[in-house]
Image: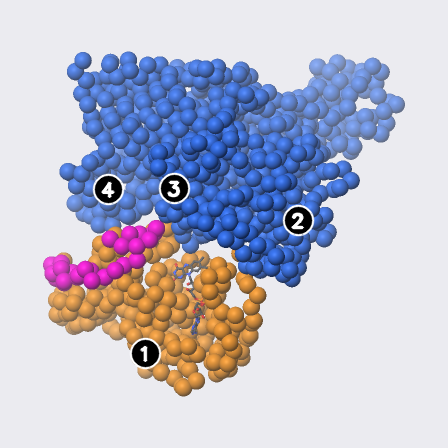
Amino acid sequence: MSGTTVTTQQTARTQWSGQSIPRKEDERLVKGQGRFADDIRRHNEAYVYLLRSPYGHARIRRVDVRAAQEAPGVIMTLTGDEVREIQKPFMEIAPPPGGYIEDYCLAVDKVRFMGEPVVAILAETAEQARDAADLVDIEYEPLDAVVTGEDALKDTAPLLHGKVGSNVVWHGLYDWGSVEEAKRQADKIVKIDRLHFHRFTSTPIECNAAVVEYYPGSGEYTFWCNNTMPQFAAMFMGPALGIPTDRLHFVTQDIGGSFGNKITTYVYLTICAILAKKSGRPVHWTEYRTDHILGGSHGNERTFLDIEVPVLNDGTILGLSARAIDDCGAYPRYEPLGSVIWSQVVPGVYRFRNVRIDYTQVVTNKCPVGPNRGYSRLQHMWMLERVIDIVAHELNLDPVEIRKKNYIKPDEMPYETPNGCVYDSGDYPRCLDMALKLINYDYWRQRQAEVRGTGKLIGIGIGSTLDSGTNNFGQARIINPELPFSGNGEVANVKLDLYGEVVVTIGTTPQGQGHETTAAQVVSDILGVSPDRVRVLIGHDNARNVYTGFSGTYASQFAVTGLGAVQGAAQKLKREIQQLAAGMMGSDPEEIELVDGTARVVGRPDTAIPFIGLANVVFANNATMPEGLDVSLNCTYTYRPPFKVPDVERKFGNLTLTYATQIHACVVEVDEATGETKILDYAAVDDSGRLIHPQIVEGQVHGAAGLGIGAALYETLEYDAEGQMLTPNFYAYKAVTALDVPMIKTAAIESPSPFSPNGAKGMGEGGGAPLHAICSALQDVMRQTSRAIVHDSFNPSERVYRLLRQQPSARRGVEVISNRS
Amino acid sequence: MLLPELEYVRPSSVTEAVGLLNSLPDAGLLAGGQSLINVLKMRIGGYRTLIDISGLAELAVIDHAQGHLRIGAGVTYDQLIHSAAVSLYRPILSEVAARIADQQVRNRGTIGGNCCYNDPTCHFPPILSAVGASFEILGTEGRRTVSADEFFVSYYQTALNPGEMLVAIEVPEARPRSGDAFVPLSVGGTDVLNVVTGAASVLLAEDGSIRDARIVVSGVAERPLRIAAVEQALLGTRGDGDALDAAFRLWDGNQLTPPDDVHASGEYRLAMAPVFARRAVEEALVKARRDFDE
Ligand SMILES: Cc1cc2nc3c(=O)[nH]c(=O)nc-3n(C[C@H](O)[C@H](O)[C@H](O)COP(=O)(O)OP(=O)(O)OC[C@H]3O[C@@H](n4cnc5c(N)ncnc54)[C@H](O)[C@@H]3O)c2cc1C
């Protein structure tokens, strides 16, 4: 599935950064020697099984666990009634009334989604715990369910959380520029009734898992787990369990994918913590796939209503207004942060300056959502790309030209968006040209005309998107001004060990992003050693390793925050080495260069002192330390991006530091008789600033493209009106496989970020470009046939079949109004 | 997910297996386990005792004699794919087996298990109906053989009575100027969840006209559906566009109540049935005509 990388180098190469060296972690991983959460074994472990709700919404009348408690091997059970006594409700990010939601680790009084854990069973074996669950007797009183965001807002809707008084978690009006003024200036206003972004998830190969142990001696809990943002989990768990958060010791190692889905596992970790303390046993919990799909973490579903787009006749878009209803499932958890995170990319890649979004987030009787690759921005940017294509469709404009006309121009960079975000760098038209060339655009435009009438239709689509990275957590205050967060950061330690080994420690939680490799590359360049000689200790361990409150791996930021910290620490160490070596050789620190694991006076190889000699002086021979020197060879550096607290009133400020570009182009063939969509050609052009490891970046581009293609054509999390999940396993949830991902042609340009410490931009999420591009291509198909509007992000064969057959008399959900004023 | 506590027995002959099936309480046969284990894991029914027939050599044999292939019920997809006899005498069966799932599933899943499970998305029921297979059944009363039309009864139901097992499937060898085809509508990527499948087998006369046609569509009714009216209408024609148009005009789905679920609506399935059936016929005709080119 390899493609061509046409990297056009714009920045100076160093010896190691910028090279696709073999990944340090691969040998271990391909040999099956990785250590994952479920691989952990502790003496005297017991196993957790979670009995989950079969209902979408029901009152729990009675729970009888007596028979289960007597079943073979059962150590104890835990119910919601007990949890209510032990646990305080988890903190809510939303201010009241949304903040009145009470979220416990097990259902208390009511179940609010199918798959919600109701009873936990701890037994000597996993099998015994599972068998005992069949003996639990629960009396439910089924309640009416609400399963769509729009229904949740109706007066008649069943309420999930009575204390809130409605199903609204958060509501806010975002209004920048003047949409009214833009509408007056416009030649036409394009109105779109409704666009729907569907619910899907990223399906990490490794499900959630943890081994949790409680030490009564110190009151400390240890979580060997695969949570990818442990200090966020700690912030919820400490107060909920009534203990200082420093008693929560997280240890992560290899993680088999997360895509954000493993951020909100604190609910499950809390169940394990309670069981571990009560039983005095290390407890082992591993999710099965059905558990994961039912109760893991879904992506946000969002409906856009009453979209109005003022445009000039030449296709210049002046602005946009819409209502957004975001469905976060039964409990907000990480939400409503998504209700502001989308505003990192308010105009997407476009220049219009007048935007008004009336944003409401609601609860429904579905699995809670959590960050999911492209989190909250992909929904918004999908809507923007739909708007561009629909405007082009309705005004008979060329989809390429309308994009180029409206793209922010490269010479406008850095570009401040209407809400104060500063796009650091980029060249969107160039990326688009490259993508079109890769798919052989002119050829397919010609083929498209030739195949008409043969039963096949060809569509060409474009997805222009941004991967905004390195959050300014100050944006959380736009949701809730009381939240004491802002900025971002990561910390790293780089040291020489006793025998001169170079050791790097970071608090991140990589899940395939190759942090060991890229961190080693950065250190190698600074310390003059080969990456083979740099040991990188990955994984979060807050009892042993450095970390900040932001530590973790999420939101496209490692290249900036993680490597920024590594770079800072390595530079500090380099200065110490220079001072020490200069002292030992009686020269000036500025004259010391680091080459091949030695420090030497510039141009004098005969003076070289190997790192082991320097380490010896500091760690085992310090009476020989040069006079007046105080070096540790153990250097920690915290990288802090240059952020300010946003203006909460105006909802204005720079919300992310870097904005990587992804421009995709695709060619699809649709079978007119059946609606089946086949991808004939696919290109992804990416601009992630300076590339530290081009192959890792390309791998992320491929992965994000594969997930996006799956989401566009096969993957959907569906519920019926009672809240029964219809796709709870791999039979029904049709996760994309390698067979369904076409050859992806890739190319990259490098527009270095002027704001990041190394010119790199965070990347990896991909911004959902395939969803945009495939919908765009399908719109191009409809242009030749029924003129239907592609209104949903999910387009399986049947939906395409129906769109193709939409009658000319049917409501198309779109209207163009000419402005006479 | 974990299996419930079960009894497990491993007979050493087919006769012993049938004996156990009739003497142990609530017992069922375990072949490749690629469907049964999943059902058991969901704990929505199933057996208390599993009789594992996957090791029975008698069931894993492919014979060719007197113009017929006899395929043991325990033959795996992987065996079908690599069998010289199947590739020579009825290659469509290897081709269909190769489309199923992944190598791990193909290493274990069996043609017998596939037919006995008889899920509407299963690959073998429609194609075996199209090629006119017959099914050899063994019970305490002895052996009997039924046609494919009789064997597939309804969703997850076959002609097997309690206590009976499927021992072999007999398929006539392909004749000169014949062609078989299997054309599914998959809703989950490559051959994942085939909601409608068209399968066809055609035989041409020496003058190139259609002498025999068996056309089957699955996914729209409780069993693979032979479309007799269309078959009849094609006989004697050359199977060109006009003939197919005329024949498929006789397709009438009005009486059918197809499944209607999250994967595909009933309406869509109904609309797709003649499309895929026709594509199967067209592909089968292309193959049958190859014998004229040689
Ligand atoms: C990931 C995955 C993907 C799959 N995709 C597909 C697909 O695309 N298409 C498809 O057709 N199938 C698919 N399958 C199912 C697979 O083909 C199964 O192998 C098949 O349905 C059952 O065959 P088995 O040998 O595994 O039977 P088992 O699962 O062992 O048994 C199935 C049923 O048949 C009964 N049975 C088995 N043998 C006999 C016999 N000789 N006599 C009487 N009863 C018997 C069993 O008692 C049981 O009730 C998939 C399976 C998996 C795990």
Q: Position of residue A804 (x, y in %)?
A: 22, 43
Left or right: A2 as drawn, with respect to A230: left
Secondary element at tag 4: helix
Callout 3: 10 Å neighbours few (<14), some, many (20+)?
many
Q: Which mark is residue A803?
A: 4
Q: Residue A240 versus residue A196: which sits nearer the camera?
A: A240
Mark 1 residue type: Val
Q: Which residue in the structure is indicated by mark 2? A: A283
Secondary element at tag 1: strand
The blue-tinted chain is A
Mark 3 residue type: Val
Q: Residue A339 versus residue B102: which sits nearer the camera?
A: A339
Callout 2: 10 Å neighbours few (<14), some, many (20+)?
many
Q: Which residue in the structure is indicated by mark 1? A: B146
Q: Which residues are magenta?
A: B242-267
Residue at point 49%, 82% (across, down): B19
Give the CA distance from mark 4 to mark 2: 52 Å
Left or right: A274 as drawn, with respect to B67: right
Callout 4: 10 Å neighbours few (<14), some, many (20+)?
many
The orange-tinted chain is B
Q: Which residue in the structure is indicated by mark 3? A: A147
Give the CA distance from mark 3 to mark 4: 24 Å
In which quadrant of the rendered view does residue A418 lie?
A: top left
In this rendering, which labeled residue sits more in front, label 3 or label 4? 3
Residue B254 counted in the magenta span: yes
Mark 2 residue type: Val
Callout 1: 10 Å neighbours few (<14), some, many (20+)?
some
